[in-house]
Image: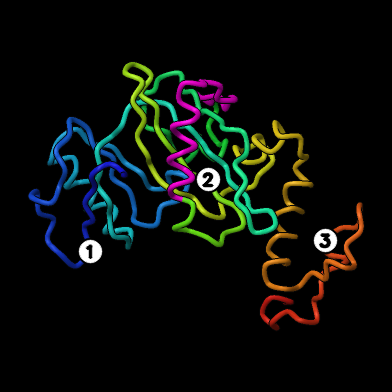
Amino acid sequence: MTADWALYRRTLPVRPQLCPRASRYVIKPNASSASWGVRAAEDWDGVCNAVAAIHAEGHDAIVEPFIVGHDIEVSVITVDGQSVILPMMIVEQDDPTLLRSYAEKRDLADHQAYAIQPFNDHLRLAEIEAATRALMPEFMPFDYGRFEFRLDAATGSIQFLEVNLNCNLWSRKTIAMAALLGGWSHAELIETIVAESLRRHGLIDLTKAKKGVPAWQIADYAGMPAYARS
């Protein structure tokens, strides 16, 4: 389960009865990506101000408790119709009580206060993998995605956060780093994802597939819809 949360629509009153109880809150646009527009608050007045600001920007707002900890990133791709979990990563923050910003996640901040490392806690790997595998069928078919959990370093508890399908594929971000640990270059990761999508849509003739031949050379683009070819 995700943390308790409330959705405040722009056209409806902001009622405290909907808000989960917490000592600290995260307030974000309903369709936020990479912490864009995310704000923090410690009381109801702060929540109201943050929701009002997000509404003024043209978005509905989600309010949820702030969970202290480090993010566990589980990258998943699909190969031959089967889900493959790449090596898990942890985003270790210098201060896990701080709210990570959009600038940090896009590597736009002057001082990055976190490091993306391999996650080797064998006591928790099986638990996180089991939770991920229980979730994956709800989203199949998908070509790639990232399942996120938060680890409380003080208590050891694990909280599921969210699923990011079609997540950031930049070579310096989590899924590319996980693929590298698994022995794939960034180019091989991208080609695998593209080839799987083409195969799933019946656009690759597997009888023509040859080792070392790029997927785009054996794809049947003539069978693609016009919008996909453009």
Labelled pair 1, 3 in contact (Cβ < 8 Å): no
Extreme-top residue of the structure: 154
Query: Which colour scheme appears in the figure?
Result: rainbow
- Numbered mark located on residue 215 in the image: 3
- What residue does disc 2 label? 146
User: At 91% from the left edge and 53% from the top edge, which residue is drawn?
Assistant: 211
Q: In this picture, which residue range is highlighted in magenta? A: 112-135
Question: Distance between the Cα atoms at labels 1 and 3?
Answer: 45 Å
Q: Position of residue 227 (x, y in %)?
A: 66, 80
The disc, 1 or 2, on the residue closer to the chain's N-terminal end is 1
Disc nearest the viewer among 1 and 3: 3
Q: Amino acid at mark 2?
A: Arg
- Numbered mark located on residue 10 in the image: 1
Q: Position of residue 109 (x, y in %)?
A: 53, 32
Secondary structure beneath dot 1 equals: loop
Tell me where residue 174 sits by quadrant: top right
User: At 42% from the left edge and 36% from the top edge, which residue is drawn?
Assistant: 149
Q: Amino acid at mark 1?
A: Arg
